[in-house]
Amino acid sequence: MTTTRSAPSEVLRNDYQKSVAAYWNKEKDPVNLRLGDVDGLYHHHYGIGEVDWSVLEGPADTREERIIAEMHRLETAQAEVLLDHLGNVGPDDRLLDAGCGRGGSSIMANERFGCSVDGVSISEQQVEFANKEASRRGVADKVRYHFANMLDTGFETGAYRGIWNNESTMYVDLFDLFAEHSRQLSFGGRYVTITGCYNDVTGGRSKAVAQIDQHYTCNIHPRSKYFSAMTANNLVPISVVDLTAQTIPYWELREKSSVATGIEGPFLQAYREGSFHYLLIAADRI
Ligand SMILES: C[S@@+](CC[C@H](N)C(=O)[O-])C[C@H]1O[C@@H](n2cnc3c(N)ncnc32)[C@H](O)[C@@H]1O
């Protein structure tokens, strides 16, 4: 498949999607760009795993550099865990990175499995950036990014062995999203998401969760909705991993860094009070 060139009016369905696209088109946040510059893998998601707190020690003039490299290592570790859940993927398979950002996870999937990956984003700037990176790395024949809406990609039916959303489900209706994923996955194909979701047990959206929504112009879903929307669309969960405890140290480090954006407090509060979880869900298409 060649990269698609669509007009914004074909891709962006409504004013909300236009505002999300505008946010990502102008986004040049150092927390994403400086971390990506470490090794050319650009992520727009959070990290997991044990922090090496020794990065806070040592010479002051290189402290920031050490913190940035450590945060990037944790974000890459998060994507590795997502890819671990895609199951058996061979070089002839096709994968879809839905809401791909600047494309780091797609590059990692191609490196790991040798397969083709299509990434889609509603941000034209991200798609252009990601395609340049794929060319620079010499993988543009296998990793292609498209300016497309993940709710209606126009891609082939049943063509994908795996599809993932890495922190991109909170911008869309889950029933619409999973209907489109279900259409594109082959029978037995695997779907994986890593996402923040709010806790049905503690009640509705907490104040901290509402602050996160406002910060990112997104709409965090309750945990329950992931499962009802999957069930309604022939996606049967096989793994559910609560990554909350594993992401808190990343946020604690990020709060101490020069690239903190101000949203660290609400994330830490939401996770610590239990109103919000960081979940991985993997499901099979039946
Ligand atoms: C937080 S970023 C995550 C990026 C990437 N998955 C990663 O892990 O680095 C959210 C992404 O979702 C994309 N997005 C939001 N709504 C979308 C839609 N309806 N169709 C395609 N992409 C969408 C945004 O453009 C952005 O790239």
Image (tube, rainbow, N blue to C red):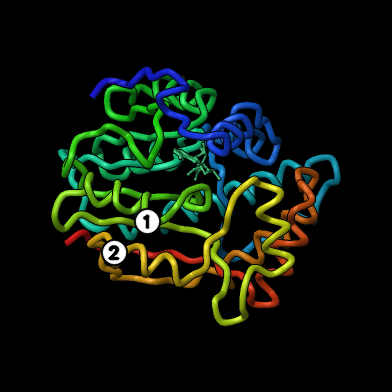
Judging depth in this view, the residue of 105 and 12 nearest the camera is 12
Q: Which numbered disc, 2 or 1, marks the residue that appears first in the sequence? A: 1
The residue under label 2 is 232
Taking the view exactly as shown, the residue that stands out farthest to the front is: 14
| Residue at image point 23% right, 24% down | 1
- Report x, y in % for residue 155: 25, 33
Amino acid at circle 1: Phe
CB within 8 Å, label 2 to label 1: yes
* Res 192 visible: yes
For mark 1, does the 10 Å Cα neighbourhood hold few (<14), some (14 to 19), or many (20 or more) residues? some
- Looking at the image, how many numbered discs can be counted on the residues? 2
Quarter of the view holding residue 24: top right
Q: Quadrant of the C terminus?
A: bottom left
- Report x, y in % for residue 231: 29, 67
| Residue at image point 45% right, 41% down | 99
Judging depth in this view, the residue of 49 and 186 nearest the camera is 186
277 lies left or right of 104: right
Disc 2 to disc 1, how far (Cα)?
Answer: 8 Å
The residue under label 1 is 175
Amino acid at circle 2: Ala
Taking the view exactly as shown, the residue that stands out farthest to the bottom is: 201
Judging depth in this view, the residue of 158 and 172 nearest the camera is 172
Quarter of the view holding residue 54: bottom right
Mark 2 secondary-structure assignment: loop
- Report x, y in % for residue 208: 73, 65
Quarter of the view holding residue 20: top right
Judging depth in this view, the residue of 107 and 123 nearest the camera is 123
Q: Is mark 1 within 8 Å of ligand 1?
A: no
63 lies left or right of 286: right
